[in-house]
Amino acid sequence: MGKKYEFWFVVGSQFLYGPEVLETVAGRAQQMAEEMSKQLPYPLVYKVTAKTNQEIKDIVKEANYDDRCAGVVTWCHTFSPSKMWIDGLVKLQKPYCHFATQYNREIPNEEIDMDFMNLNQAAHGDREHGFIGARLRLPRKVIAGFWQDAPVLAQLADWMKAAVGVLFSRDLKVMRFGDNMREVAVTEGDKVEVQTKLGWQVNTWPVGTLVEYMDAVTEEEIDALMAVYKEAYTFATDDMETVRYQAREEIAMKKMLDAEGCKAFSNTFQDLYGMRQLPGLASQHLMAQGYGYGGEGDWKVAAMTAIMKSMGENGNGASAFMEDYTYHLVEGQEYSLGAHMLEVSPSVAADRPRIEVHPLGIGDREDPARLVFEGKAGKAIVVSLVDMGGRLRLICQDIECVKPIMDMPNLPVARVMWRAMPDLTTGLQCWIMAGGAHHTVLSYDVSAEQMRDWARMMKIEFVHITKDTVPEKLEEELFLKDLAWKLNI
């Protein structure tokens, strides 16, 4: 999905140094964009060497209305007076990165003269350009370093993926099958505020409509999906009718989602009118295809799952709906066990998932089929978006996923085990202080820095719990953030 996007490279200069300098700047900018694009996930397209207020306004207007443009990267090869950028930058509606670099890696001892100095003024120009970004209080990413260095290009690549997540968010539609679980606070939220800030269109469809779609699914359609299941998963059950019912649910949900252009959905075990099973395998396989999901009607985590999948490789990265279920509090072996009743995405599985059928103690329906697996080991994050009343807060915690330290043979659900940073109890204290939800998105391939970039572009609050976080300092940070956001500064 993401390969349709491109990023625009806009280079700053002015007429002061003459036409030959401008031709050199344009040629170098074209070369840099082409060479960097070979190492980046999306093309970086050189658009213009901007020399006037009008040129900058024109390119910003074009970027705002071009659906292919996912963001603008600026660089000042020479000195570009910053007042001429004001009218354009205040109107920019796409993600913005200031790339502070220079064409040459080294100062050429024998060649350097005043002509060289006039041409190569990035150290001068980028500071002037940076001031106007700060003065206008623009949400921006600043990347500094030599444009051919791998770490620098990696930063730019990560920012590009976060920017694609922004565009995905602004077009996102979320389908709610019924309402959220009764009496739960954290799954509530202001849908008008969310659409204003993040672009999400969140609406409800009756479960009865889904049942009508299910009734219209043919046996041939179910046969085709069963073949897909057999290709992707191991059948550890002989109850084919139950698996086929999950296939019926999946086909119906996908038809509704696609008909409405929705890429995320939520449901609840308290609203299954006319359905024989809570969708388990059905929801999991939809998530494997890039759809976001939230249990108990949690539409915020459903949307965040879809967004973080869009930011991963191939639009379906290793990100999954997750819930902290229980703790292992043995000294020196402190772990969180993450799971859910049924619905954890197989994109985080360490090995080939198994389709199993087991009783479900809630919902008062038939035993549903679900995928059972262990999550893979590796560094990851868990992310929670919460409504703080008047503003949104994105909370991100660094974690280290491990192979589960026990088999848990009687736990019939997908499970992931991890060490929370800075440690389980301190991390838990910090999470609770920040108001983090019990539902999260767990991701192996979206970083905390990318989520910080995404939050900055979306103009929402970001809280990061790391190996160095101290509860007392976090409490102070949260207090100051609360003041700043209430003052709208």
Image: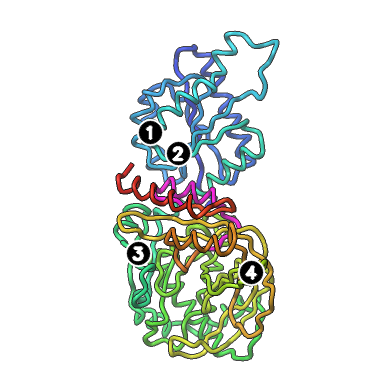
Q: Residues within 10 Å of mark 2 (few under 14, many from 20)?
A: some
Q: Which mark is residue 7?
A: none
* Residue annotated with mark 2: 140
Q: CA distance from mark 4 to mark 3?
A: 30 Å
Give the camera-side residue of 289 and 332. Answer: 332
* Residue annotated with mark 1: 89
Give the camera-side residue of 225 and 357. Answer: 357
Q: CA distance from mark 3 to mark 2?
A: 28 Å
Q: CA distance from mark 2 to mark 1?
A: 11 Å
* Residue annotated with mark 4: 375
Q: CA distance from mark 2 to mark 4?
A: 35 Å
Compare marks 2 and 4 and give the one earlier in the sequence.
Answer: 2
State which mark lies toward you, 2 or 1: 2
Compare marks 2 and 1 and give the one earlier in the sequence.
Answer: 1
Q: Position of residue 163 (x, y in %)?
A: 48, 47
State which mark lies toward you, 4 or 3: 4
Q: Residue at x 35, y 64 (%)?
A: 202
420 sits to left or right of 91: right
Compare marks 3 and 2 and give the one earlier in the sequence.
Answer: 2
Q: Are dots 1 and 4 in contact, CB under 8 Å?
A: no
- As shown in the figure, which amino acid type bears the numbered disc 3? Val
Q: Position of residue 280 (x, y in %)?
A: 52, 79
Q: Is residue 161 above or below residue 329?
A: above
Per the rendered image, the range of residues in magenta is 442-463
